[in-house]
């Protein structure tokens, strides 16, 4: 009985934590070890929610979000996908991604007022 309760608790905790990555304004980078050189540095977005998911550790989230290319960068606002940038065949996100995402975030923030 105790083992069953532990398993249920872990499943509940995983479900809660997997939903939090979309709360507020969130930047999520989906990647894998084999293409880590193609990722962008997410430091410019640290004033918002920033998450980095690895294919081997978070495969269910990749499937749920329909990630087809690695790396992929997604901007969410309160659960809604706002902008997606995919690396494609190059396995590398352009440095322009930072400016594109910042422009989207600025638009979201200005629409609040």
Image (cartoon, grey):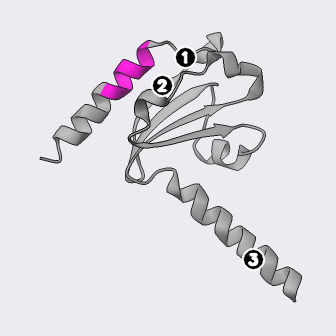
Q: Nearer the viewer, residue 29 or 79?
A: 29
Q: Say which element carries label 1.
A: loop
Say whether marks 3 and 2 touch (CB < 8 Å): no
**Crowd class of label 1 (few under 14; some 14 to 19; many from 20; radius 10 Å):** many
Q: Residue at x 61, y 48 (%)?
A: 64
| Left or right, residue 25 beside residue 29 | left
User: Relative to 33, does residue 63 appear above or below in the rendering?
Assistant: below
Q: Say which element carries label 3.
A: helix
Instruction: Determine the CA span between mark 2 and mark 1.
Output: 8 Å
For disc 3, the marked residue is: 8
Q: Quadrant of the N terminus?
A: bottom right
Say which of marks 2 and 1 sits in front.
Answer: 1
Mark 2 or mark 3, which is nearer the start of the sequence? Answer: 3
Q: Position of residue 68 (x, y in %)?
A: 63, 30
The tag on residue 85 is: 2
Is-magenta flag for residue 85? Answer: no
Residue 51 quadrant: top right
The tag on residue 48 is: none
For disc 1, the marked residue is: 93
Q: Position of residue 67 (x, y in %)?
A: 61, 35
User: Relative to 73, does residue 60 appear above or below in the rendering?
Assistant: below
Residue 83 quadrant: top left
Q: Say which element carries label 2.
A: strand
Is-magenta flag for residue 98? Answer: yes
Mark 1 or mark 3, which is nearer the start of the sequence? Answer: 3
| Left or right, residue 34 beside residue 14 | right
Q: Residue at x 67, y 16 (%)?
A: 37
Say whether marks 2 and 1 touch (CB < 8 Å): yes
Instruction: Determine the CA span between mark 3 and mark 2.
Output: 35 Å
Q: Position of residue 111 (x, y in %)?
A: 17, 42
Instruction: Determine the CA span between mark 3 and mark 1.
Output: 38 Å
| Region rendered in magenta | 96-102
């Amino acid at each position: 009985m105790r083992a069953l309760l532990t398993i249920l608790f872990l499943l509940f905790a995983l479900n809660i934590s997997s939903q939090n990555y979309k709360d507020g304004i969130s930047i999520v980078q989906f990647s894998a070890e084999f293409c880590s050189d193609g990722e962008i540095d997410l430091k410019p977005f640290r004033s918002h929610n920033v998450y980095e998911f690895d294919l081997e550790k978070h495969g269910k989230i990749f499937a749920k979000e329909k990630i087809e290319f690695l790396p992929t960068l997604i901007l969410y606002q309160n659960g809604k996908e706002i902008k997606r940038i995919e690396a494609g065949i190059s396995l590398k996100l352009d440095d322009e991604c930072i400016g594109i995402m910042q422009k989207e975030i600025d638009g979201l923030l200005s629409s609040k007022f």
